[in-house]
Amino acid sequence: MNHVNRMTSRAMASAKKPGAAAFGGAAHDHGACIADALMAAETICRERGARLTKLRRRVLELIWSSHAPVGAYVLLRRLSQEHESAAPPTVYRALDFLLEQGLIHRIESLNAFVGCVEPSEAHAGQFLICRHCGAAAEMRDRRVNKAIGRTASDLGFTLEEATVELRGLCPACQASDDA
């Protein structure tokens, strides 16, 4: 059975159905979601001996500010409001670091980034992306990853990176379409 990963146990405890937090469900405490993501990032970086600088932390916080994927230039615009010296290389270096640490994912088709809901474990990204509001929920089904890996292997293909992007309507947009 497919499942949508929990953002954190605290952030999802009050959600009524899987994926509600990622799609902005009414019961979702997004403040706790952001705080938990930042705390996890600090722990992971400390354990790995990686430096989560103030700028890298702020870029991660801006990415987590919404469950909608965010592009590098949107991040740059937001950072420029706080730091006059913010420039594209600054943002791209921070994004590269966050990607290397597994703290974010890149959604290729949108050339945008989202926070990773399970940064402590390396994994391929699988995303449900709402075509109406743009929200993205990360799901993880190990069977999907195994099937992709098995098929690639059967074809003699060396898989280096895999991201699955599925488009549709989130629960909130479905409800507004029904109304």
Image (cartoon, rainbow, N blue to C red):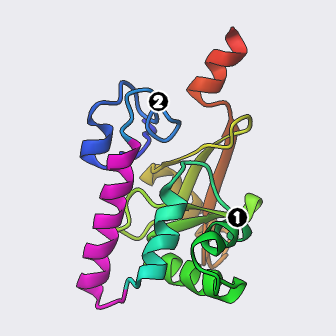
Which of the 4 image quadrants contains residue 111?
bottom right
Q: What quarter of the picture does the N terminus occupy?
A: top left
Height in image: 31 above or below 149?
above
Residue 122 lies, in percent from the top left, at 41, 71
Crowdedness of circle 2 by 10 Å Cα count: few (<14), some, many (20+)? some
Residue 36 lies, in percent from the top left, at 30, 57
Write the residue at 25% across / 74% down: 43
Residue 78 lies, in percent from the top left, at 63, 66
- Is residue 136 found left or right of 30 in the rendered image? right
Q: Which residue is mark 2?
A: 25
Q: Is residue 32 highlighted in magenta?
A: yes
- Is residue 78 found left or right of 149 in the rendered image? right
Q: What quarter of the picture does the C terminus occupy?
A: top right
Residue 7 seen: no
Write the residue at 70% across / 41% down: 167
- Between 157 and 136, the one nearer to me in the picture: 136
Checking the image for residue 143, the label placed there is none
Residue 126 seen: yes
Q: Amino acid under label 2? A: Gly
Q: Secondary structure beneath disc 1?
A: helix
Height in image: 1 above or below 150?
above
Residue 171 lies, in percent from the top left, at 57, 25
Count the numbered circles shown: 2
Q: Which residue is mark 1?
A: 74
- Magenta span: 30-51
- Between 125 and 116, the one nearer to me in the picture: 116
Q: Secondary structure beneath disc 2?
A: loop
Q: Earlier in the sequence, mark 1 or mark 2?
A: 2
- Is residue 11 found left or right of 30 in the rendered image? left
Give the Cα distance between marks 1 and 2: 24 Å
